[in-house]
Amino acid sequence: MEILNRDVSAARAIAAGAILAAGWFAAGAAAGCSTNYVEGRYSCVPGEEDTCPAGWFCHASDRRCYSYPPDRPDVPDAEAEVDSGGDAGDGADVEAEPGDVEGDGAADAEEADGFVPCSGDSCDDLDPCNGLETCLMTGLCQPGTPLPDYAECTTAGGSAGACLGGRCDWTLAEVTVPAGTFRRGDPTASPGDPDDPVHEVVLTRSFRIDRYEVTNARYRACVAARVCRAPDRNDSHTRPRYFDDPAFDRYPVIRVSWDDAVTFCSWLGRRLPTEAEWEMAARGDCARVAPATCGPEDERTYPWGDAAPRCDLANHDDDATGVCVSGGDTDAAGARPDGAGPYGAQDLAGNVAEWVADRYGATYYQTACASGCTDPAGPAAGAERVVRGGSWHDPPERIGVAERASLAPASRNDEVGFRCARDAPCGVRRVGAPAPVHGLRHGRPESEWRVGEGRARADARGVRGGTQRPRLGSRRTAADVRPGGPPG
């Protein structure tokens, strides 16, 4: 009984201290705050006040919402002020009052002016990742037990995601790519180019691939676990502080090597996607466009189709319109949903180029896959690794789904990141193709098709501003993928 009443008195002191601290509770209604909200009930993202009720503040100390700012006088000081400012009778609150009933702590706590005790399941913030919050008899909410990082979850808004740091994070979501056949390569490539010839690739097992590129927040968790090494530098192209700045938590990690990417994905029980899996996720199975068999209609140029890149589709660099991010730099993961691929993976074109598992061979398509491949894993030997998708620094002709780049696996720069993949649970070999979307081509009705669409491309391939740039399949120079210097 004595312990219970001390807890009740503490609840009163906290509530009273909050009133004294600049009158935040008293002004709650004027600020648009509902007295139905419970202090510390809602989890939030520091710096993103819209994750709290209107007019409330996200405290970085416990990632919870409160009606007062983080820099208010702390509770112990406020409590001391209450004790010193009261009369002699105030001390009686510590002892049991006549009529107190054991177990009625919430009712006692409610007597404190401005304090709204919890009740029932009112403490649960509906985020499964931080566990089920419960209401104590004192009227205060008790935190739940967080789920392990990367446990699958659904956000309050209904988006699929995974747990990280006790929050359901939509940037950790995956998409499933079914087994099937797709057309790989570039129909406009010249004979002997690294992405020539166009050929059919069969993937016999479905797989999952990250919907978004791996973010700074995700990678920092691996560094904190002492599994991954930190990027070699903390900055990005235009930002002096990037990797460890919470403002860029949901931006893609950069300055990581191929080995760094492999280590991170392995930490999660995943892997880098193969080059074939990456292009399948970006281009799509032949059965997605009628007819179900493979043909020129399945050779989409970009993840979204054949329309020329715009800044609402991909973060890239265009001579006509300039860079999409001021000064040229990365953008937040998933900032351009209209540019998603056929299965929903985002930022496959631009933002950051992405490491994949395969070794690079400039003639691999011609020597190993000219007549088609099944589950190709790239050449058995080679000094470099494949990089796909192009980056914020690349022009439209360098961010297509067929473009191939290569880098030494130890390379770490401000244009390259990655995403992870894994075999789909209970994946099965392909028995038949899914029903085609009849009458559609890259999402448009047949009446809007153009003669030769899917093959015609800009003639000035690899030319930017009148200056020949190395093709993605060739050895890139320091001016093409920089360790952080000005654009080449």
Image (cartoon, grey):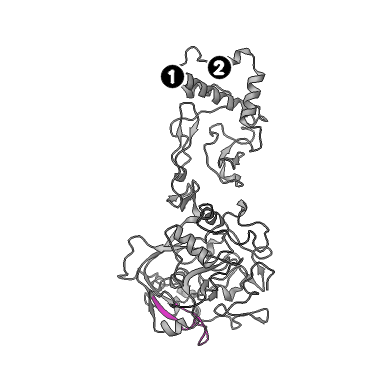
Q: On screen, 226 above or below 350?
A: above
Q: On screen, 174 above or below 98?
A: below
Amino acid at dot 2: Asp
**Which residue is tagged 2?**
93
**Where residue 340 is drawn, which disc sits there?**
none
Q: Position of residue 250 (x, y in %)?
A: 56, 55
Residue in the foreground of this view, choosing between 109 and 444: 109
Secondary structure of the residue carrying tag 1 is loop
Quadrant of the rendered structure where residue 16 is? top right
**Where residue 102 is drawn, which disc sits there?**
1
Q: Quadrant of the C terminus?
A: bottom right
Res. 337 visible in picture: yes
Amino acid at dot 1: Glu
Quadrant of the rendered structure where residue 295 is? bottom left
- Magenta highlight on residue 200: yes
What stretch of residues is rendered in magenta?
Answer: 184-201
Quadrant of the rendered structure where residue 233 is? bottom right
Q: Position of residue 358 (x, y in %)?
A: 46, 73
Res. 369 visible in picture: no
